[in-house]
Image: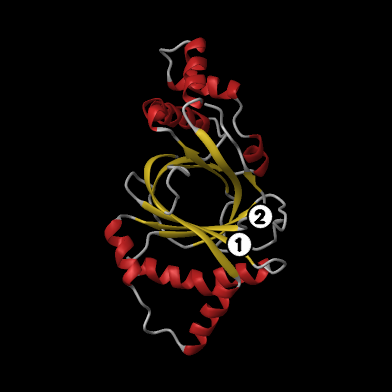
Amino acid sequence: MKKFLMIIVFVPIFNFTLLAQQNKYLVFEFIKVESSEMYDFIAYKDFMEKVYQSAISDKRISGWDFWVIQSGAEPGEFQYITVTYYDDPVKMMDGIANEDLVKYGRIGFPHMNENQIKEMIKKSQSAFDLTQRTYMKQIANSNDDFKYKNGVLASFDLMKAVENNFQEYETAEKEVFLPIHQNKIEKGLMGSWVLLRTALPFGSEAKSTHLTMNLYKDYVQFFNAQEYEDMESTAEEKAKIESGLKSRDQKWVYLARLEGAVR
């Protein structure tokens, strides 16, 4: 099965900082798997967990997540999202070449020889279609100690900021919406929040420019958060929220469950 790849490109990087943090660069890959290929793909997922663990030990990447879509995607669009974490934009753009996958595979599976590893990689990569890849930089996040473990939920919200007005949108996220999310976290209604901006230039036809990750420890916390209403907001705060909402278009929302993470 041949893979189709569409790279989404976005906006230049501004000099915004928030909550003293290390730079984080994330690659999102949206994956479609035919039912007939499901067994080989699950084998690929298990294989890659060990490969990426070796890549982390080699400081090539800083983490990898495997998410299963719960809602938001059109039938047949894609069923999985993987997120690979880097601490450097050059490492992110270089990715991991097949020869390095073989090297890390030999470390993770010492009982297999090089040809067996190559065959495993070839067979696994033919089991899915890579429908979309997005390169992002983290530009803001909540203050929390959220732990990534199997079963946690994430709402991936793809946004498109108003053209030529990205600063207004990002300021709204940081100064208006982040405090709201932080308040939810402190009330136990949310686990974590992250704002990302594309790490590459983009054209006016780009489908989205930013992405937020809203993280929850389980479905109970997720649904409680949906029911929460801040009754203490002032008229001025509500006006800022309304203005912030107008600074971007919420293009898609995907709810996903974490089924694998290595750090």
Q: Residues within 10 Å of mark 1 (few under 14, many from 20)?
A: many
Secondary structure found at label 2: loop
Which quadrant holds residue 173?
A: bottom right
At label 1, which amino acid type do we have?
A: Lys
Image coords of residue 185 (percent x, y): 38, 66
Marks 1 and 2, the one that precedes in the sequence = 1
Q: Residue at x 56, y 31 (%)?
A: 3
Which quadrant holds residue 161?
A: bottom right
Image coords of residue 256 (percent x, y): 39, 50
Image coords of residue 174 (percent x, y): 56, 69
Q: From the viewer's perspective, is residue 167 above or below residue 230?
A: above
At label 2, which amino acid type do we have?
A: Ala
Q: Which mark is residue 258?
A: none
Q: From the viewer's perspective, is residue 33 above or below residue 88?
A: above
Relative to the observer, which residue lies in front, 30 or 65? Answer: 30
The residue under label 2 is 206
- Quarter the C terminus occupies: top left
Q: From the viewer's perspective, is residue 88 above or below residue 37?
A: below
Distance of label 1 from label 2 (alpha carbons): 8 Å
- Single out the residue that lies furthest toward the front: 75
Q: Which mark is residue 160?
A: 1
Q: How many marks?
A: 2
Secondary structure found at label 1: strand
Image coords of residue 140 (percent x, y): 56, 61
Cβ atoms at labels 1 and 2 below 8 Å apart: yes
